Image: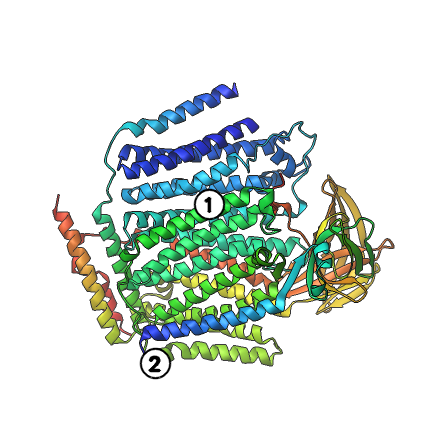
Amino acid sequence: MTTRRKLLIGSAIVVLALGFVAYQGVRSSMVYYLTPTEFRDRPEIRHQKVRLAGRVVPGSVGRAEGVAQFEITDGITPYRVRYAGPLPDLFAEGREVLVEGRLDDAGVLQASQVISTHPPEYKAPER
Amino acid sequence: MIEALLLLLSVTAAAYLLAPAFRRGPIGRTDPRTALENARVAAVQSLRDLELDWQTGKLSDEDYRAQRATLEAELAAVGRRLAALAEEP
Amino acid sequence: MGEIGRYALLAAAIVALYGLVVSVLGLRWRHGGLLESARRAVTVWALLIALASAALFAAFLGRDFSVRFVAGASETTQSLFYTVAAFWGGHDGALLLWALILAGYMVAGVRGLRDYPDLQGPAVATLFVIAAFFSLLLASASNPFVPLIPPPPDGQGLNPLLRNPWMAAHPPTLYLGFVGMSVPFALVVAALVTGRLDDTWILLSRRWVILAWLFLTLGLLFGAKWSYVVLGWGGYWAWDPVENAAFMPWLTATAWLHSIQIQERRGMLATWNVALLLITFGLTIFGTFLVRSGVLSSIHAFAQSPIGYFFLAFLAVLLVGSFALLAWRWDLLHSRGTVESVISRETAFLANNLLFVSAAVVVFLGTIFPAITEATSGVKINVGPGYFNMVMVPIAVGILLLMGIGPLLPWRKATPEQLARNFTWPAAAAVLVAAGLAAGGVRSTGALLVFALVVFVGATIALEAARGTAVRTRRGEPLPVAVWRLLARNRRRYGGYTVHLGILLMLVGIAGSSAFATQSQALLRPGERFTAGRYTLEFIGLSGREEPGIDITTATVRVWAGARFLGTVRPERLFYRTQEQPMHHVTIRSSPREDLYVILSEWEPDGRAMIRVLIHPLVLWLWAGGFVIALGVVLAVLPETWRRPVPHPATAARGLPLSAQGTSGAP
């Protein structure tokens, strides 16, 4: 076997292995990213892990013993969210947030993560 | 006031830019010695690297001698071409 | 100020287009006068961009809120430092900074090509393509001097999250890295156009790429530090698309810096090196596009702003154009050598390239995955950090292994005896340390693997340096002289090893903090204590104060490690009134062993406060690694010529001064 062929076979093995790991990685970490209305209209992914983008409904935020409850909405569909963890700095009533989690049987989104959108430095210019 | 200054600036810049544009001249050529000199420096560097690799025990004596001969031949060839250019005016 | 700025940007756009047209015509007609005019246009363009930047600075310093960008990113209560940093605290100013940096690189790059007039012309034309694009953007859709009528009494202020020294330094550093790839890109295009595809372009671009690589590294680290200090979650890397945008060109540039060595030493991979540099430059533009177009939040950003289309069109022109040139010159890029043995440094470099480029592909796919799924199925599907970590950890382990093996392998081929001689001790040291750590209670397999490999690589570098020094001391040189001369005479090699050491330190920090981080929190009444790891914290109480525009609540917390009193920390929570935005001031007690990170999370009306404590082992080494990398790069790029005697062709032909000194030092 020539050196060149050995190298090619070695590279192919590495690439295939990495491809396989990447495929597994995608499968295990993929999250649907939608607006509350899009989520409501897709019952087939009702129990999947999702990331919803919406505005925090003013007056809906309640905190007790480290657990936060609030509602998010895209203006059409509201969802109740329950989150046990520290809320990000940019979190406030009326602000845009991303909420990642799963819907429980009562229709409350049990959040595993609440993310505020990036600082304006990174946002598209608003014209 | 500002407008006048900016106008003056524009005119100066335009004159500076356009001045050479009408003189038709040849494009400069890179001195062939530059490339050869670069090749010589690279070859010297390679030899020095090879030397250090051998001294620190990464190569067998046999491989070292063979590679050194190749590199020295390359260097000599570059040197001859440089010398030939130097003799030309 | 606004009108001077608008004038300068308009004039800059015209000059850039002029420079582009004149340089192309000059090349086509072989007209030296036109090329001289194009060179002058470089200077004029740079001065105009500098004038526009000066105008923006002046507008910020004079708090000229009739300029919308100034009103949007500063306010009267803002400190001088952040008023200056607000220059790049928003989209339009950031693009102007991009152009300003390009102006500096362009002047320096074109000057550096004085001795290569045939390459200079096409390089100027290429740089003007880039300059024209950014100038047009700045003069139209992203003009930072758009007036605001009527001017408001006060501005909106810089986003409080950006009011941090690391964030002030992050964009300029990152742009120095991104834009730094423009000069090498112009050089490789010039080489393709003229067909001068010997090693000259590599020689000329190498330093630019190393420099740009250093700035990319530092820019990434500054961003990580900012995230660690400011965002209040204790993390420094989240596989955020914005971070990935800068990470991808870093990966391919790293690959390039290794693969050119095969071309320099063995005359192989000429085509690959050209392609890799084109891709690296393309990724810097792609990164700017990702960050600046808003495509990250949604592909619908295209509908809202034309900038996305501008960037995509520009990127397409650059990539199609440059790869067409590569295809046209394909035949000139032949290989002079072949890989002779699988166990050789060539193979190590090839494997390095395979892994780095794979890493870039993995990051690229993960970053654009939502855009792909949104375009094909209408639903955005994100892949989380889980995906990146799963794939990048094995790649990083592979690269780490190569980092140890590669430098000790000779070119062409290695024999088993040499391998045994070179790898016995480092491998033994690695196994010993891993066993020791495991016995000491370290249970994370990943961390053990990384620590063992770090020891392995560190030992190979130490062994290599020791043997190099020994060669000199055997010749009778005193030890300090031997070390100094070894470093001074082989700067590129030891600069490279120093960079490797810096990477090792960073990996120690990353492995330590990701495998062993712990966190805990407690709702405490004043006077109550709680224990986190080996620390005991006592919450003393809350206090409030005001600064211009900011309400601040401070928690006073006393900290003990075991029975030893460490001191009092005061984490704060700030509320910026103008922006109605809360923010943390966390306190971090750093030591080589671990960081104690204390956060005031929230509080109840009755005076109880939620205190969060994170313990991050070894994080300090991540930042320390950055310093070591910078040192290594400086060592590697310092000119080697100052010691070399003036070359004389005749002596060069006969042989070398080193043959006299070298052969006596047989091992």
Report the amino acid beneath label 1.
Phe
The correct choice, above or below, for B72 with respect to C24 in the image is below
Q: Is residue C58 visible?
A: yes
Nearer to us in this view, C364 or C150 = C364
The residue labelled by disc 1 is C314
> Which residue is pictured at 51% across the width and 58% down the height?
C626
Quadrant housing the N terminus of chain C? top right
Local crowd at mark 2 within 10 Å, few (<14), some, or many (≥20)?
few
Nearer to us in this view, C68 or B89 = C68
> Which residue is pictured at 55% across the width and 41% down the height?
C306
Image-quadrant location for residue A50:
bottom right
Q: CA distance from mark 1 to mark 2?
A: 52 Å
Q: Position of residue C188 (x, y in %)?
A: 35, 50
> Which residue is pictured at 29% across the width and 68% down the height?
C338
The residue labelled by disc 2 is C416
Q: Is residue B87 left or right of residue C79?
A: left
Report the amino acid beneath label 2.
Pro
Q: Check the image and name the residue furthest to the right.
A: C606
Q: Secondary structure at mark 1?
A: helix
Q: Is residue C443 left or right of residue C492?
A: right
The correct choice, above or below, for C529 with respect to C293 in the image is below
Local crowd at mark 1 within 10 Å, few (<14), some, or many (≥20)?
some
Q: Nearer the viewer, mark 1 or mark 2?
A: 1
First in sequence, mark 1 or 2: give its number.
1
All told, the count of numbered labels is 2
Q: Chain of mark 2?
A: C
Q: Chain of mark 1?
A: C
Q: Are marks 1 and 2 in contact (CB under 8 Å)?
A: no
Q: Position of residue C406 (x, y in %)?
A: 39, 70
The correct choice, above or below, for C276 with respect to B53 in the image is above
Q: Position of residue C106 (x, y in %)?
A: 40, 41
Nearer to us in this view, C619 or C149 = C149
